[in-house]
Amino acid sequence: MRHQVLVKPHWTLASLLRDILNLTSVKVACGTGDCGCCTVIANGKAILSCLTPAARADGMEIETNEGLRKEGHLHPIQTSLVQHGAVQCGFCIPGMVMNLKAYLAENPNSSEEELRKVLGGNICRCTGYVKQVEALLKARDELMSEKRLS
């Protein structure tokens, strides 16, 4: 879905997505790019929307969690996180999903160690990342079998 919005110079991409376009899966926690909660995919790459000026998104394809549902079904990463009980409070999960979706699209054969490193960019205060890693390994395998990395 295309949007044309006149943005103010001080707006971040996160504020545009959340406050103007009502895409509330984009979370803002730290506002300094340290926690990963605001991660979205811009032209196939994971970016921190709290640090990205909204005007920079001009002409970009931006993906958020709201756009991952296809034909009424969650993306395999989302489904696996839910099935493995890895969601907890859920605040960090949207950014985690976007970060991992972008990473797996470029690195479909990622090892557990590589996925753990990628998760390092997303701070979760509820867990020790064990269930998230289990869920991501399962999702990676499912995506590979479906060749559905997009």
Image (cartoon, grey):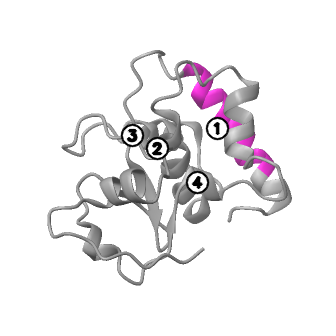
Residue 79 placement (x, y as % from top left): 74, 38
The amino acid marked with disc number 3 is: Cys
Dot 2 and dot 4 residues touching (CB under 8 Å): no
- Give yes or no for residue 136 being in the magenta stretch: yes
Q: Is residue 44 above or below residue 114?
A: below
Whether tag 1 and tag 4 are in contact, CB under 8 A, the answer is no
Q: Indicate the amino acid at tag 4.
A: Lys
The answer to whether residue 3 is magenta is no
Dot 4 crowding, Cα within 10 Å, few <14, some 14–19, many 20+: many
Q: Earlier in the sequence, mark 1 or mark 3?
A: 3
Pointer 3: what residue? 37
Q: Are marks 4 and 3 in contact (CB under 8 Å)?
A: no
Q: Is residue 84 above or below residue 17?
A: above
Front position among marks 2 and 4: 2
Identified at 42% across, 25% down, the residue is 124
User: Residue at 70% of width from left, 28% of height from top?
Assistant: 82
According to the picture, the residue beneath numbered tag 2 turns out to be 95
**Residue 97 % position (x, y):** 56, 45
Residues under numbered marks 2 and 3 in contact, where contact means CB atoms less than 8 Å apart:
yes
The first of marks 2 and 4 along the sequence is 2
Segment tinted magenta in the rendering: 130-142
Query: Marks 1 and 3: which is nearer the front?
Result: 3
Task: In the rendered view, tell whether residue 144 sits above or below residue 106.
Answer: above
Of the two numbered discs 1 and 4 on the same chain, state the one appearing first in sequence: 4
Marks 2/4: CA–CA distance? 10 Å
CA–CA distance in space, label 1 to label 3: 17 Å
- Tell me the quarter of the picture where residue 71 sits: bottom right
In this view of the protein, which residue sits in the foreground, 127 or 57?
A: 57
Out of 112 and 43, give the one closest to the viewer.
Answer: 43
Q: Which of the two residues, 65 or 107, is positioned nearer the viewer here?
A: 65
Q: Earlier in the sequence, mark 2 or mark 3?
A: 3
